[in-house]
Image (cartoon, rainbow, N blue to C red):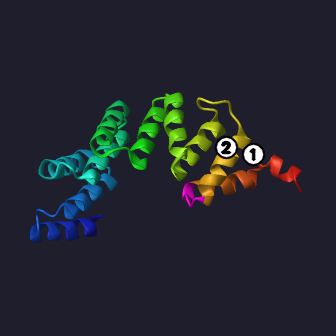
Amino acid sequence: YLEAKKLFDKAEKLDNKNTNVQIGLGQIFEGQKKFNKALKVFKKIIEVEPNNIDANLHIGIILQSKQKHVNAINHFKNINKKFGNTAETLNNIGNSYSALGEFDKAYDIWTKELEDGEPKAYFNIALLYFFGNGVKKDLYMAFDYCEIAAYKGLPRAQNNLAYMHLKGLGTEKLCKDW
């Protein structure tokens, strides 16, 4: 991070109005878990460029990282009002609802995302079924949703699917067909 920070500082001196440089600097602070510094950078970007969706998204993600899920939900909903629904904002709203234990709201958001084929939505629903959060625990459903997310290229889902295969979780029906 230190070397990257030096390079971003140098780039900022060359062009201090370049929002891409500022985004990178904010991401460095975010990666270092220096959330207040990151927030300051992203808010500065929005002052200059209010329609910068990247800076807006990062603010919501930082709110989640700081466990301020109600604020994050409101922030992401405001982004949706301003820019229209995006898969990323909807996924993050669902994640915050899930973190608050409001699994029914998370489930509703993620099932709507399935219409667009969102891999993260499939994966998140798989986790709900895997742990029985807001739905009846069902390893077969967890396996099916995880498999779809994995085939759509989501690395976390591929990892979880491999684990489920390894441990035989939700795979019993596969063996019956052999």
Quadrant the N terminus occupies: bottom left
Tell me the CA gap for discs 2 and 1.
Answer: 7 Å
Q: Residue at x 16, y 52 (%)?
A: 49
Q: Where is residue 129 shown, x and y percent of the image?
A: 64, 37
Q: Residues within 10 Å of mark 1 (few under 14, many from 20)?
A: some
Residue 139 higher or lower than 165, as above or below? above
Q: Where is residue 50 shown, x and y percent of the image?
A: 17, 48
**The image quarter in which residue 69 lies:** top left
Q: How many marks?
A: 2
**The image quarter in which residue 125 lies:** top right
In the image, residue 153 lies in the stretch drawn in magenta: yes
In the image, 172 versus 29, the foreground residue is: 172
Q: Is residue 143 left or right of residue 99?
A: right
The residue under label 2 is which amino acid type?
A: Ala
- Label 2, secondary structure: give it: helix
Q: Where is residue 105 shown, x and y percent of the image?
A: 49, 30
Q: Residue at x 62, y 59 (%)?
A: 151
Give the number of the disc on residue 170. Answer: 1
Q: Start and end of the magenta stretch?
A: 152-156
Q: Where is residue 168 shown, x and y percent of the image?
A: 77, 50
Do labels 2 and 1 touch, CB within 8 Å? yes
Q: Let me know if residue 68 appears in the view.
A: no
Quadrant the C terminus occupies: bottom right
In the image, 22 versus 30, the foreground residue is: 22
Give the number of the disc on residue 34. Answer: none
The residue under label 1 is which amino acid type?
A: Gly
Question: Disc 2 designates what residue?
Answer: 142
Q: Residue at x 27, y 49 (%)?
A: 34
Residue 126 higher or lower than 158, as above or below? above
- Sooner in the amino-acid sequence: mark 2 or mark 1: 2
Residue 108 higher or lower than 170, as above or below? above
Q: Residues within 10 Å of mark 2 (few under 14, many from 20)?
A: many
